[in-house]
Amino acid sequence: MEIINALNKRYSAKAFDKNKKISKENIDKIESILQLSPSSTNIQPWHFILAQSDEAKKKISKGAQGFFSFNEQKILDASAVIIFSSKTDLDENYLSHLTEKEDLDNRYKNDEARNMSHNGRKTFVDFHKNKFNDLQSWNDKQLYLNLGNFLVSIATLEIDSVPMEGLSMNIIDEEFNLRDRGFSAKVVVALGYHSDNDYNLKLPKSRLEKDEIIERL
C-alpha cells in the first residue's frame, strides 16, 4: 500500500476480530520490521516478545487489570501482541557485541575503522550515563523510534494495531522476567484485524492542519 494511503487508513483499533489471524508470511515481515528499525549509533537497545499463543496473551493481560481493564480484551482478542522493552543498561560487553556483529556484517574496512566506530558509540553511551544521567530515557527514545517505524510499516501491510501504555508494566516485567534479563517493558502493541463493532473505525481521522504544525522557510 502506498505510504500516504496507509497513513490515512491506519487508526488505533479498539476491538479485534479474534477469528482473523495474521499469516505466517506477515509474521515474518513483522519480525523483520522490528529488526530493521534505525537507532542512534545503531545501539539497538531493545527486546521484543511476540506473543501469539493464548497462554502468552493471558500473561500480558495480567497487566491490564483494575484501572487498565479497558485494554484486556484487546490483548486477548488480538492475533498477536508485542511487548516493546528497552535495555536498562549498556555495558561494555553489549557494546563489544554490537561492534563484533557489525564487523561480521562487513561494516569495517580495517581495524582503525572498527575501533573508531566502537569508541564513538561508547562516547555517546558514556555521555548519557555519566554526564546527562539519562541513559534509560535515551534507550527509551530509541525504542520509540522503532515503535513509530513499526506502526507505519504495519499499516502498509493492512494489519490493524493499537499501541498501549495503559498497562501495569511492572507486572509484565515480572511475568516475563524482563528486569532480571536487563530489560523493562515500555509499551505493548496488539495486532490483528478490526472487529466490525469497533467504534473507532467509523470515526473520521483528525489531525492539526499542516499550516499550524509546519513552518516553511
Image (spheres, rainbow, N blue to C red):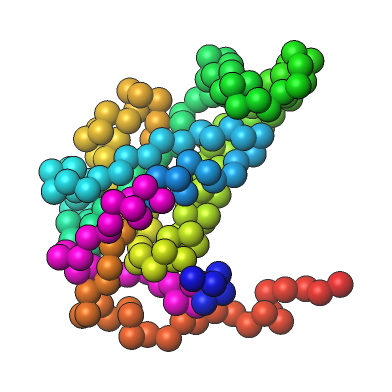
Residue 70 lies in quadrant? bottom left
In the drawing, does residue 134 fall left or right of residue 198?
right
Does the magenta portion include 21? yes
Residue occupying image coordinates x 25% and y 40%: 171
In the drawing, does residue 174 fall left or right of residue 40?
left
Q: Position of residue 25 (x, y in %)?
A: 33, 53
In the drawing, does residue 178 fall left or right of residue 154?
left
Viewer-nearest residue: 208 or 58: 58
Viewer-nearest residue: 69 or 108: 108
Does the magenta portion include 209? no
Residue occupying image coordinates x 18% and y 43%: 56
Viewer-nearest residue: 149 or 29: 29
Q: Position of residue 117 (x, y in %)?
A: 72, 24
- Quadrant into which the C terminus falls: bottom right
Viewer-nearest residue: 158 or 88: 158
Residue occupying image coordinates x 25% and y 33%: 176
Q: Position of residue 155 (x, y in %)?
A: 44, 66
Residue 4 visible? The answer is: yes
Magenta segment range? Answer: 6-29
Q: Is residue 204 above or below residue 137?
A: below
